[in-house]
Structure formats: structure tokens, C-alpha cells
Image: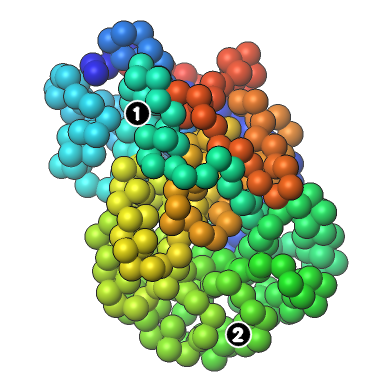
Amino acid sequence: MKIQEIELRIIELPLVRPFRTSFGTQTSRQVLMVKVVNEKGTAGWAECVAMSEPLYSPEYTYACIDLIKRFLIPALKKAGEFKAEDVATILKPYLGGQMAKASLETAILDAQLKDGKVSLASFLGATKSRVECGVSVGIANNLDALAEEVKIYVDEGYRRIKLKIEPGWDIQAVKLIRDIYPEIPLQVDANQAYSRSDGKHLAQLDQFNLLLIEQPLDEHDILGHALLAKEVKTPICLDESIISLQSAQDALALNATTVINIKPGRVGGYFESVKIHDLCVANKIPVWCGGMLETGIGRAANLALAALPGFTLPGDTSASSRYFKQDITTPFVMDDGYITVPNKPGIGVEPDMDFLESITTTKEVIK
Ligand code: OSB
Ligand code: MG
């Protein structure tokens, strides 16, 4: 394909309730939407999962826009004719920027698959037509509020609960939810809030039969996670630390992780995600699909990935209603704890242009 034009648009979507993690509180989701039009006039869509501030990863919305405009689009234009499979190689000289790169690659792939009339799910090797849904639950104002929020999700049918934790909001919060739901699959996510000396403290979580503890330490502290794994029986699952196939290989070789959360944006796209999936399958490492408060555009693509056979744990692939009153696509609805994987060509969904325009804060078209 060849690029005819690329549209970069920032939208602002309010959240149904504040989402608090150890790195901050979000009340709305700022998203960079990427639309790529190829030489045939086919439009492909993707969203860049970077947040408005560099709190979860070094990338943020305006940095991604700058990187895309200043370096990535010129590199693609210079390449002339290429396939989605070539995008990562073309962009490789520019370091980092996985989320920005993933958004371009995915929009290009969406257009390519639409032209070829192939769904992203079947293209990636999906074997499931629906995926099991988990939900990520933010840090609450108090324990009563936490129990109330978790009850909403359990009643809706979510099949796995993930509690966000931080020092001061961990053992008690987990105990409360485990006491109320003795059987529900339960896990925690610290988003790097602990340090190497917290091993004894975190080992108190072992009594609650958790599936895993996600990213307890700094993203760069691979050795620290390996040391922690000797003190804590609960499996450790890296999120922020896994930014590529290479980093996944290293973390596994060093015994720093025994479960992996794959987020396509964090690792640079869906091709890299499938490589990490394949590595984990070969090593019998369970994987699950993480989330970044995606709109229906990003959610659709994540569902396609989560339908691959190695995704044996429920992901943060929740329904649109978990975060948004109104989604920018036809909403993803959960049925009996599952969401159906889109099977139309490409990512399989289109934005509602009227609604998208109404929440757009800036838009520019690059020819
Ligand atoms: O660490 O998994 C995380 C949201 C934003 C940034 C990081 C994370 C999260 C979540 C929610 O936990 C995932 C989702 O439901 O989309
Ligand atoms: Mg996480």
C-alpha cells in the first residue's frame, strides 16, 4: 500500500467514574485517533493508547503526535510502497515510541485487511469467537466503596477481578474482596508502587489465592522482580517492563515473571504481540490481554488478539460500559462474562463520525 493521507485527531471521552491507580486519577480519557487513507481510498483506524501524561509509560498524547508528524510519517512516505508487515522495520531507526508506532501500524493494517476482506482476528490466528472478560477496579475512597463497586462488576458477570493496589491500599482491600467472593478469580496490579524491600509485606497476599501480582516494582527493575519472586509465592506478572519480544525473552530467562500481560500499544503493535504470545506458548507461560481504557476502536483489535489460543487467562477486555457512557463505536457488550470477537474485515468496527466529531478537540490532516 501507499499512504494518501493521515488524520490525527484528539478526542476527550468522559469516564463513567474516576479511575484511580498508584500513578494517578483519571476522570476522562484523552485519546489520539489515527486514520490512515491508502492509495485506494480505504480508511484504516486505530487509537494510540498513550495517556495524556507520561505516568504509566514515557509516552503521552502530544509526544506521540510530535513523533508521528516529525519522524514516523516522513519515514513511511519515504518508503513509498509497503505492507503493514514492513512498518515496524521502516520505523525501527526511531527509538522508543511503541504506542505511537503501534497506532500507525494498526491503522495501516486495518486498511490493508479491509482491502483483502480478512478480519484482524483470523489474520492474527484467533481460535476463539468470544473471549472471557475481566475488569480492572481502581483504588476506592474507602473499603465500603470498593465492595460496592466490585459487586456491580460481579453482578454484571465479570469472570475475573483485578484490584489496583498501592502501599496503604493492599492487604486489607484484597482480604475484604476475597472474604466476600471466596471463589472468584482475583489478581492485583501495583503499577510499580513498591520497592525491593517490600517482599515480606507483599508475601501477605499469598494467603488470598491470587492469580498474580502485576508489576509490583519499577519497570526497569527486572532483577528486583526476580528477587521478589523468591519471597512471594503469588505469581509475578510484568506489564510495564515488557516493551518488546526481547524484553519478554529476558524477563522469562531471568525468572522475573511467570505470567505476561500483553498490551499491543506497549510492545509496538499486533505483530510484536503475536511474537510474544508465541514465545509464551512455547514456554508454557500464560498470557492475557491488558487494556488502556480503549475506545471501541482499540477494544476491537484487542479482542482479536485475546482470541489467540495462548490467552488462557481473562484479560482487561471489559465491556464499553465499564468506562464510557457512550463509546465511539457500537458498544462492546458482555454476555455471560464474554465478549464476541469482531469478525468483519480489518478491526471490524467503524467510529460513529457524528459522535466522534462532537468530542474532538483538535484534528489535522497530513497529506
Ligand atoms: O496497568 O493495566 C494497567 C489502565 C491504564 C494504564 C495502565 C493500566 C490500566 C488498567 C486498566 O489496569 C485496563 C483497562 O481496563 O483497560
Ligand atoms: Mg498493569
Q: Which mark is residue 206?
A: 2
Q: Residues within 10 Å of mark 2 (few under 14, many from 20)?
A: some
The residue sitting at 44% across, 84% down in the picture is: 228
Foreground residue, 4 or 109?
109
Q: Is residue 146 above or below residue 103?
A: below
Q: Which mark is residue 109?
A: 1
The residue sitting at 65% across, 35% down in the picture is: 332
Q: CA distance from mark 2 to mark 1?
A: 42 Å
Please state if 164 lies on the left or on the right of 266 as rendered.
right
Label 2: element kind: helix
* Location of residue 90 in the rendering, given as x and y in whole percent from the top left corner: 17, 34
* Location of residue 248 in the rendering, given as x and y in whole percent from the top left corner: 31, 63
Quadrant containing the N terminus is: top left
Foreground residue, 40 or 307?
307
Give the image quarter of residue 126.
top left
Amino acid type at mark 2: Asp
